[in-house]
Amino acid sequence: MSTNTATAPTGTLHKRAILTIVLVSYFMILLDNSVIFTALPSLQADLGLSSAELAWVQDAYTLVFGGLLLLGARAGDILGRKPVFIFGLVVFAVASLLIALSPAAWWIISARALQGIGAAIVAPSALSLITVSFEGEERTRAVAWYSATAGIGASLGLVVGGAAASWFSWRAGFFINVPIGLAMILLAPKYLPHTPKLPGRFDIAGAITSTLGIGSLVFAILNAAENGWGTPATIAGFIAAAVILAAFVFAEARAAQPIMPLRLFASRVRTGAYVARLLYMATMIGFFFFLSQYMQEALGFSALQAGLAFLPMTLVNFAVAVFIPRISRRFGDAATLIVGVALTLVGIFWLSRITVDSSYLTAVALPMLVVGVGQGFAFAPLTNFGIRGATASDAGAASGIVNTFHQVGSSLGLGVLVAVGASAASGIDNAPLAISSEASTALETASIFLFIALIVAVALVAPATKKRP
């Protein structure tokens, strides 16, 4: 793809408008990845959901989001990122309205899947639009804001979800997307740049096999949590996942225009960043999912109190993220990433010590601040390394893979941690004691994810950054 963008903006105000539209849209997507967490108890009671159905309300979104991200990235390359971005916003806003009107489990799970389709279209185009609209130091700052949005959006979603559930209804957390989405849809045609359309075809086989393969794996993990690891359905799910994902890799190796060009994994930097991101997000999804329930069911917080309890972490995350470009220039992205993952590991392991009698201040709030600092350090370099060295023609695919590993990590992580947590809480009838045991065990497992991510960052990313990937 040519890097020429004839209508690319040059004015500062125009660029700020582009960044605002992109970040607000991306923020809205990430907000809905976590807005549901603090509303889980009220949502479950309102719709009469089982534990498995409750997990699927979240996984339907992250699974479809992650599974179709690469196809969404390819659509931006072929059809133009601006019209694709706008279409994705329309789908997302409509799906948000349908979720807010949900009368039953099947409806909300289906609408969350539709919302995931919209998110999968918007997210890769968002990062690609930043890539083509900014250069040099401006791009570094724009990516830093994009990465800060990733952490802040997830954290602030808990506050919004808690406030909506306490003051109005859990449905209000989704209704709010409609006017925001409409505003971005109206502004995008005026300010977003046109990008060249690449000739090519959609890799439908790759999109189908990747989504079905990941979906089968998530199904197998969640089914194991509810019915056992040795049940026929669980075993069949794992076998199907292995076969379909192998078919995906085979298809991508032979495709003329794959949605996941395997050549992007030739770089140790990018590969390490993808793997570290997957493990990092597998941890963070459990952090939000279990702590929001723990604070409500064990500590007796309301939904709003639970959401506000995450606010200090959000503020610290934002404060650190503002200085990340300066820190990275001085110490390098690799050192920044390693410090970020290490701090997050310390915070998550500290949180895993919670019990039913723990104090919010010492057992929850303080380690959450450490996690917030770690997030602020980790996200920007993870994003930078994920797109580093990608050619202009691979920019969409590289950004799609970054977001794919982000969402797939969330889906798989939640499945594994729910299974591990359910096993730990099995046989415990006391609800506060059960959620405490479940959360503690899940966060211990999440600490292992982060330890592996730290090893990946040290062994793969850091050495390779000494030379051009």
Image: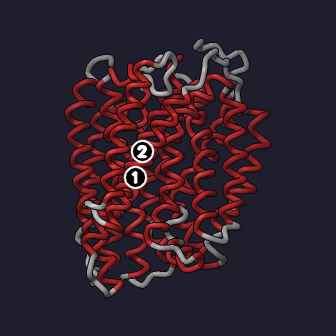
- Dot 2 falls on a residue whose secondary structure is helix
- The reply to whether residue 374 is visible in this rendering is no
Place of residue 270 in the rendered image (x, y in percent of width and height, measured from the top left):
35, 28
Q: Nearer the viewer, residue 307 or 236?
A: 236
Mark 2 crowdedness (10 Å alpha carbons): few <14, some 14-19, many ≥20: many
Which labelled disc corresponds to residue 218?
Answer: 1
The Cα atoms of the two marked residues, 2 and 1, are separated by 6 Å
Q: Are marks 2 and 1 in contact (CB under 8 Å)?
A: yes
Place of residue 395 in the rendered image (x, y in percent of width and height, measured from the top left):
51, 23
- The reply to whether residue 384 is visible in this rendering is yes
Which labelled disc corresponds to residue 214?
Answer: 2
Q: Nearer the viewer, residue 148 or 161?
A: 161
Could you tell me which residue is drawn at 68 percent across and 65 percent down?
Answer: 100
Mark 1 crowdedness (10 Å alpha carbons): few <14, some 14-19, many ≥20: many
Which labelled disc corresponds to residue 154?
Answer: none
Dot 2 amino acid type: Ile
The coloring applied to the image is: secondary structure
Could you tell me which residue is drawn at 52 percent across and 34 percent down?
Answer: 207
Give the answer, above or below, for where 453 lies relative to 233.
above
Dot 1 amino acid type: Val
